[in-house]
Image: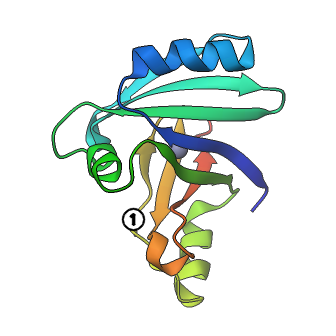
Amino acid sequence: MNKIEHIGIAVKNLKDSNELFFKLFGEPHYKTEEVKSEGVNTSFFKVGDNKIELLEATKENSPINKFIEKKGEGIHHIAFDVDDIVGEIKRLKKEGFKVLNETPKKGADNKLVAFLHPKSSNGVLIELCQDIKG
Ligand code: ZN
């Protein structure tokens, strides 16, 4: 794994949170993107070299809704940049991690992504992401 790619934060209302995090960082978000397959709207902020992703549910059964119902708003996942997501999935399965996406799928921000179940990683939802080239 190369570095933390971004930190994902679950929010109830993306518009309100975009304003809140604008105040916090002093810079507005630089993009928003809907990921239909996940039932989420996302927005991204740059903080120096780091990225923060805000996630809002777009449908009742969105994983973000379920998360907020259980735990409230807050840090939802940590994403790590990898060069070879398929290789990493294989490696981590062998190490005993529960991989939620055996086949990586298209996520926000032109990435291939796969998640590890928080139960196998001390309660932290881990996202692997690899840039889609070309
Ligand atoms: Zn993410």
Left or right of residue 22, residue 104 in this image: left
Q: Residue at x 61, y 71 (%)?
A: 87
Find the residue positioned furthest to the right.
48
**In percent of the image, x 52 and y 40: which residue is there?**
9
Q: Residue furthest left?
A: 60
Image quadrant in which the N terminus is located:
bottom right
> Looking at the picture, does residue 24 appear above or below residue 102?
above
Q: Is residue 12 visible?
A: yes
Query: Dividing the picture into quarters, in which one does residue 42 lie?
Result: top left
Give the residue at x 84% y 27%.
48
Answer left or right for 83 relative to 121.
Answer: right
Report crowding for label 1: few under 14, some 14 to 19, many 20 or more residues within 10 A (C-alpha): few
Residue 1 to residue 122: above or below? above
The answer to whether residue 103 is above or below residue 46 is below
93 shown above or below 83: below
- Image coords of residue 19 (percent x, y): 54, 12
Please provide percent x and percent y for residue 85: 59, 61
The answer to whether the beta carbon of the residue marked 1 is less than 8 Å from any atom of ligand 1 is no
**Residue 134 in sight here:** no
Q: Nearer the viewer, residue 35 or 88?
A: 35
Check disc 1 and report the residue beneath it. Answer: 101
Residue 107 in picture, x, y percent from top left = 45, 41
> Is 71 left or right of 88, judged from the image as shown?
left
Give the residue type that dot 1 points to. Asn
Q: In terms of depth relative to the viewer, which is nearer, 121 or 104?
A: 121
